[in-house]
């Protein structure tokens, strides 16, 4: 039974509305509900003054009282977004270019306000200073790696379908490695174009290559298992990157923090790359990023190289879009 065109139009309209609702929750909703909640900061001051300062900010700030050396180490380890130092020479607000810029901005404003209320306008000190390109590059590289791998995987799937060819294990593995090499080269070119001072060291390029191959392997594995249906998951994830992964978790609504930020792959690559670009290779998020991206790469390669499904694919190749003449005797 053929459905009327009006019914098909209604179904299409409902599908479009549902997609808009989902993307609204995933992207703009995270930005619209952003607000400071327990942003970690540190104060290094005499005990009685430190206690007074720690009462500043309500629930928006989470204060840690420490010595100047310990407070700066917390900043190096990315456990706080800023440090307020109070001493005989006055007040100093210390931030770091290797820390998430959204959280750093909130911490800097709050610490400056607290210092001004007690000792006048504070001095500003930045550890590992980052340029605008340096603050933008980590998330940009992660998003470019994801979308580059996605286009490559989708292109291979569609080309194979159109030509009637079976995509074997070797072709998919070549695609993963090729995406890793070419996307890394493209990202390195952008870094050099955006800011010649950005370091293109073996550690930085190796981390970008790991992220690109991990994303490519994961996507290739899902496309192999689900075909074009995998795009329902892989496509929206790209839109999550700037809205969620680029935010400090303490600025996100708790629901977004738990359901999206906690597991989105972009944050692991972006934060690890930010530390490497700013010369902090020993930061905890570099180690975490290596483990997470390495796990994604391993899981993706298992899906890509698993021989069982390859045998079925070879037994049931795609039929070419052409007419085959069959003679009947």
Image (tube, rainbow, N blue to C red):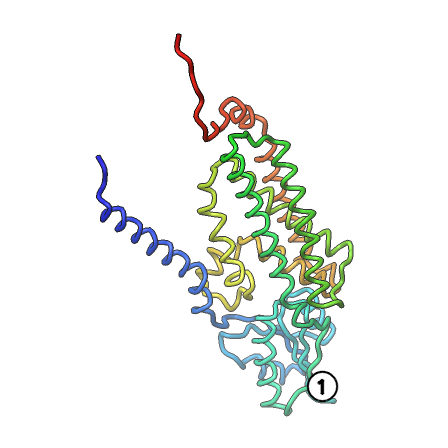
> Where does the image place residue 168, in percent across and percent down from the top left?
59, 30
Question: Element at badge 1?
Answer: strand
- Where does the C terminus fall, quadrant-wise? top left
Q: Quadrant of residue 178?
A: top right
Q: Quadrant of residue 24?
A: bottom left
**Image side of residue 304 versus residue 260, left or right:** right
> Where does the image place residue 183, in percent across and percent down from the top left?
66, 51
| Mark 1, residue position | 87
Q: Quadrant of residue 220?
A: top right
Q: Residue at x 59, y 75 (%)?
A: 105
Dot 1 surroundings within 10 Å: few (below 14), some, or many (20 or more)? few
Q: Residue at x 51, y 39 (%)?
A: 158
Viewer-nearest residue: 242 or 48 = 242
> Where does the image place residue 144, in percent across and percent down from the top left?
60, 55
**Image side of residue 7 versus residue 291, left or right:** left
**Image side of residue 187 versus residue 157, left or right:** right
> Eyeballing the image, is 55 above or below 156?
below
> Where does the image place residue 114, in percent across and percent down from the top left?
58, 85
> Eyeballing the image, is 162 above or below 273?
above
- Where does the N terminus fall, quadrant-wise? top left
Q: Residue at x 43, y 19 (%)?
A: 325
Q: Residue furthest right?
A: 201
> Eyeballing the image, is 146 above or below 131?
above
**Image side of residue 308 versus residue 126, left or right:** left
Viewer-nearest residue: 247 or 328 = 328
């Amino acid at each position: 039974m053929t459905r009327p065109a009006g019914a098909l139009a209604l179904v299409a309209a409902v599908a479009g509305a549902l997609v808009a609702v989902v993307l609204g929750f995933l992207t703009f909703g995270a930005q619209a509900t952003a607000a400071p909640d327990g942003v970690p900061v540190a104060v290094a001051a005499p005990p009685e003054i430190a206690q007074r300062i720690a009462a500043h900010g309500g629930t928006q700030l989470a204060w840690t009282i420490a010595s100047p050396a310990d407070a700066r180490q917390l900043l190096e380890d990315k456990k706080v977004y800023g440090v307020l130092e109070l001493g005989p020479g006055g007040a100093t607000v210390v931030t770091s270019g290797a820390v998430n810029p959204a959280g750093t901005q909130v911490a800097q404003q709050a610490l400056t306000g607290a210092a001004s209320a007690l000792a006048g306008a504070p001095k500003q000190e930045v550890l590992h200073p980052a340029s605008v390109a340096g603050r933008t590059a980590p998330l940009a590289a992660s998003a470019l790696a994801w979308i580059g791998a996605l286009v490559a995987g989708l292109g291979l799937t569609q080309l194979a379908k159109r030509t009637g060819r079976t995509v074997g294990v070797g072709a998919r593995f070549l695609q993963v490695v090729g995406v890793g090499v070419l996307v890394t080269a493209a990202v390195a070119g952008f870094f050099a174009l955006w800011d010649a001072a950005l370091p293109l060291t073996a550690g930085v390029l190796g981390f970008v290559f790991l992220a690109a191959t991990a994303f490519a392997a994961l996507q290739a594995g899902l496309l192999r298992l689900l075909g074009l249906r995998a795009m329902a998951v892989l496509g929206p994830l790209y839109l999550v990157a700037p809205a969620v992964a680029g935010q400090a978790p303490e600025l996100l609504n708790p629901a977004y923090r738990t359901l999206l930020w906690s597991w989105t792959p972009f944050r692991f690559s972006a934060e690890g790359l930010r530390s490497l670009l700013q010369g902090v290779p020993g930061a905890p998020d570099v180690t975490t990023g290596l483990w997470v991206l390495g796990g994604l790469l391993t899981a993706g390669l298992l899906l890509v190289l698993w021989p069982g499904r390859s045998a079925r694919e070879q037994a049931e190749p795609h039929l070419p879009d052409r007419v085959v003449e069959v003679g009947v005797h």
